[in-house]
Amino acid sequence: MNTTIQTILVIITVSLALVYLAKKFVLKPKKESNKSCGSSGCGCD
Amino acid sequence: MSKQINVALIGNPNTGKTSVFNALTGLNQKVGNYPGITVEKKEGLCKLHRGVKAHIIDLPGTYSLNASSLDENVVIELLLNKNDKDFPDVAVVVSDVENLKRNLLLFTQIKDLEIPVILAINMSDRMQRKGISLDIDYLEQHLETKIALISTRKNKGIQDLKQLISNYKELSIKPCLNASEIDIAYFNNLRKAFPNQLLYKLWLVITQDVNFGKTDRKTIDAVNNFKTKKPGDLKRLQQKETIKRYQFINNVLKKGQTIDLKNATDLRIKLDRILTHKVWGYAIFGIILLTIFQAIYDWSSVPMDFIDSSFASLSEWVKSVLPEGAFTNLLAEGIIAGIGGVVIFIPQIAFLFLFIAILEESGYMSRVVFLMDRVMRRFGLSGKSVVPLISGTACAIPAIMATRNIENWKERLITILVTPFTTCSARLPVYLIIIALVIPEGRFFGLSYQALTLMLLYLLGFLMAVFSAYLLNRILKIKSKSFFVVEMPSYKVPLFKNVALTVIEKTKTFVFEAGRIILAISIVLWVLASYGPGEQFNNAETIVRTEHTSLTEEALEDKIAAHKLEHSYIGIVGKAIEPAIKPLGYDWKIGIGVVTSFAAREVFVGTLATIYSVGSAGEDEDTIKSKMAAEVHSNGKKVFTLASGISLLLFYAFAMQCMSTLAIVKRETNSWKWPMIQLASMTVIAYVAALIAFQFIK
């Protein structure tokens, strides 16, 4: 395995890690529910 | 092609519903969430005869279809929506033989939705001991259903239940109660307005404010000027419905069930008297806790040492086998070190959940909730806060969601705000590694100092939660209280299968959920620690060799690695925050660990494992623990001392370091205000506590 291949593999691995972290913490899909919590005034209505 | 039917497992809490689910599905099960909400969804596959498969859904436990929480709403919404892909072809209502009367309320409600229902009467092995006898033929005839008398404990009746599920088409869908009897005039109007709809479904839509298909309370209101009643009147009608149902149930059970109290043993009452005693109850609970923490340490040290040294060897092996280069280093120092930082804690986490599962399965946990309720009330917390606080020892996220059954908003808010103080499993890896480094291995009355420290940290988290609740209670001026009812299930010998499944599931969650985050962060950290800008990083070798001409080759390599790390990207960040954390006794490397922990606490150990792997060229200190123990300041003093260790433990005990928890608090309070207040106040408390501890002990 030469240096170039090793560098490419590092870039791919790090990119995958960054995408995963971004998906997990930054681009988390919003799953808003239209359900209330069963109590008034809780701010969820 | 094989046919698949949907089977919903429904029942009151503590009826052994999950045991039935486990017995039917074995390991063919998966746990997820219902779409849009975070209520746990358990589903699995069960092979019936002639190639038919049953898709089994274990629905959240509920006492009736009168929902008061999101969990219970899930049950109703599924049963009302025929278009749902999970809508059951047949429902299995699991009931407990000792509480048949109460369990039948839910059964009659589901039956009235005209869904084929099987009644599975669980814990039948206890009938003789409790003096209970059932006339199954009579019950089947009058409840218009088929009954499976089962015992998941003795593995009896499961085949009969499978047979009944296979023959579900033979089940009657005749309702138990004529819904019109609740209020004849009102229901006649309802029938006129919706001639094609099932009356009981409409009644549930009106009273529960749920929707099925395109029908909800508003559309019912709008159609033909049909007016729903006021909430107070609806509540009264609901009570009337419940009374009518119990009249029906009483009539059926009068002949279908006989209980001979003379034959019943009262061991449960005797045990309850001791285990919930105002002195002995707490003493026994304390002894149980001590035993658990001691066992966690004693039993897991061997597998932990084995895992730690195995990963160290694996890292060395990868370096020796693969050609030198950036990716080989990433594998050895980033990925393997990162995975090692997760896997090493499997034994202790598995043992912790083993004990929790045993306490829950045996029925003791409900007694603990009852005991704690007494304490809670003195601090102004709702009795219902006990469950979130206790379940917070596993994870704050489900614990915060469990506050949904607290009706009073202010009490619920206080519980949400203080729950993250309880020691969650993510803190465990941090505690374990720091305790192992700074607390001596001696024993006190047979209990190791390390186990005692761990127990004290759990107590500290709990006390801090209660104390904060007391303060918040005063600040927020709560006047009203909610009521707390806890069901005391019978004592049972824990089922090995259930305990094992709980341990496997929880450990899997830790490894795969936390593990993925730790691994990803480890990879990013490795890059930040392995590359850097400027001359100091790029010419590290020349600079160090010029400055230290008298050192041996091995010492020089260590110096070069340390110099590079100090001038890497992560080193620059670490150095920038060092002035803020130095008074707490931390160096910049620990600082990086603390900063990355704000994503999730458990990242701390993986972070340090990665940083120390990159920053060390020697092979003497190969395990995570030994690398941390060997770490010294520039003046030669050890980094991990009693003072810095206690400071770190206190910081992690109080700091709000979990982005997922903050996100869930935002969702539950529908505002960023509360999570931000929580983050700021907990961080300040953690900083001050750590500062005081370090300055006093050093």
Image (cartoon, coloured by chain):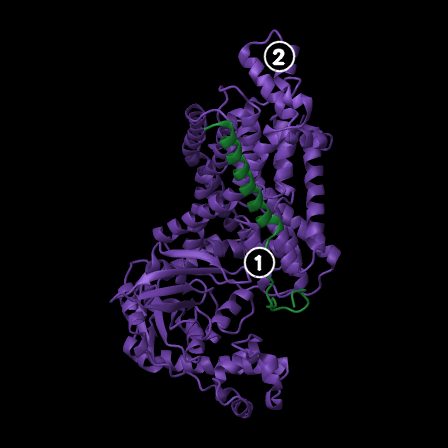
Chain colours: A green, B purple
Residue beneath the point at 45% across and 67% down: B12
Q: Amino acid at mark 2?
A: Arg
Percent x, y of residue B674: 70, 54
Q: Do we see residue B161 in this rendering?
A: yes
Q: Residue furthest left?
A: B50
Horizontal side of residue B163 vs B415, given as left or right: left
Horizontal side of residue B60 vs B470, given as left or right: left
Pointer 2 or 1: first along the chain: 1
The correct choice, above or below, for B399 with respect to B625 in the image is below
Horizontal side of residue B113 vs B655, given as left or right: left
Under circle 1, the secondary element is helix
Please name whichever residue, B646 or B158, is drawn nearer the observer in this view of the structure. B158
State how many labels appear.
2
In the picture, the quarter occupied by the C terminus of chain B is top right
In the picture, the quarter occupied by the N terminus of chain B is bottom left
Q: CA distance from mark 2 to mark 1?
A: 58 Å
Horizontal side of residue B5 vs B659, given as left or right: left
* Residue at the disc numbered 1: B401
- How would you rate the neighbour count of disc 1 (Cα within 10 Å): few for under 14, some for 14-19, many for 20 or more? many
* Picture disc at residue B498: none
The reply to the same-chain question for discs 2 and 1 is yes
Under circle 2, the secondary element is helix
Residue beneath the point at 47% across and 64% down: B60
Please name whichever residue, A4 or B245, is drawn nearer the observer in this view of the structure. A4
The correct choice, above or below, for B413 with respect to B686 in the image is below
Percent x, y of residue B458: 56, 43
Chain of the residue where label 2 is placed in the rendered structure = B
Q: Amino acid at mark 1?
A: Met
* Residue at the disc numbered 2: B545
Percent x, y of residue B313: 43, 26
